[in-house]
Amino acid sequence: MPLIILTGYPTSGKTHRAKQLQTYLQTRISQFPDSSSSSTLRVHLISDHTLSIPRGVYNLETKSQHERSNNASEKDARATIYAAVKRVLSNKDIVILDGANYIKGWRYQLYCEAKAVKTPHCVVHVGTPVEKARGINAERLAKRTALGAEGSADTMNGVAEEDQPYESECWENLVYRYEEPNAMARWDAPLFTVLWEDEMPPCEAIWDALVGSEAEGGKKLV
Ligand code: ADP
Ligand code: MG
């Protein structure tokens, strides 16, 4: 069953879209009769916050761009995410990977993992304009300042990790390093896009392309 990889700028709405997709898929699966093996399909939502990976791993620790993208804590975070995906990806499990997934080589690695377990995959690009996404992070930073938690490690008590801001410099650097998905690259295809104004991600198209025909007894697209 598919691996659905979200990608987009920080604070572009990836978690919001991942949750919408999760709800859609769970509802769709619940509509299969109990006698159908598809009724037991499981949906997993994996993200930094489900794995307790703090925003801080994306903070800049070194000076050069090269070293920045090889930040050790970020590498460790990727290893944790990879292991979590690998653990659950099977023909009975649908995995939604909520994260920036901004490195092309990383998306390629995930694509290879899906191939290895003979399951389809797709990429969902949360195509929020950069100014909009920056504005959301700025709002979160302002809220943190208002709460008087600026600079403190255990900031914003009561605010979920997924709703915390990135440090401005870190946010800008993640955008700078962002490698846009390309529908022509096999590891980014099929590629679905969801725009800020869209009420929902293209759930039906994702279902039809990756889950539907197989779950309903037809051929699957790998
Ligand atoms: P990300 O996971 O990319 O960091 P979030 O999903 O946490 O971003 O979204 C950031 C904020 O913007 C959240 O408060 C979310 O509810 C809101 N949001 C995201 N997408 C939309 C949208 N399309 N329309 C309105 N609000 C949105
Ligand atoms: Mg998020």
Image (cartoon, rainbow, N blue to C red):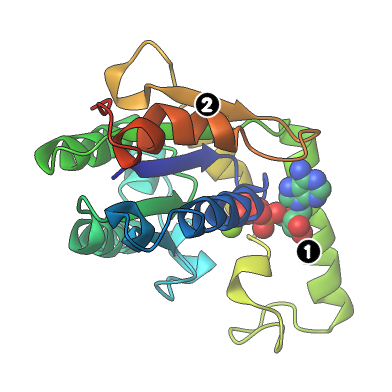
At label 1, the amino acid type is: Arg
Q: Secondary structure at mark 2?
A: strand
Q: Is residue 188 visible?
A: yes
Asked if 134 appears above or below 148 in the picture, the reply is: above
Residue identified by numbered label 2: 192
- Dividing the picture into quadrants, the one containing residue 112 is top left
The residue under the point 67% across, 44% down is 12
The residue under the point 45% across, 29% down is 208
Asked if 98 appears above or below 51 in the picture, the reply is: above
Disc 2: CA contacts within 10 A as few (<14), some (14-19) or many (>=20): many
Q: Is residue 14 left or right of residue 197?
A: left
Q: CA distance from mark 1 to mark 2?
A: 28 Å
Earlier in the chain: of badge 1 and badge 2, it is 1
The location of residue 194, given as percent across then percent down, is 64, 31
The location of residue 102, given as percent across then percent down, is 44, 38
* Residue 175 numbered mark, or none: none
Q: Secondary structure at mark 1?
A: helix
Residue identified by numbered label 1: 140
Q: Is residue 168 visible?
A: no
Q: In which quadrant is the C terminus drawn?
A: top left
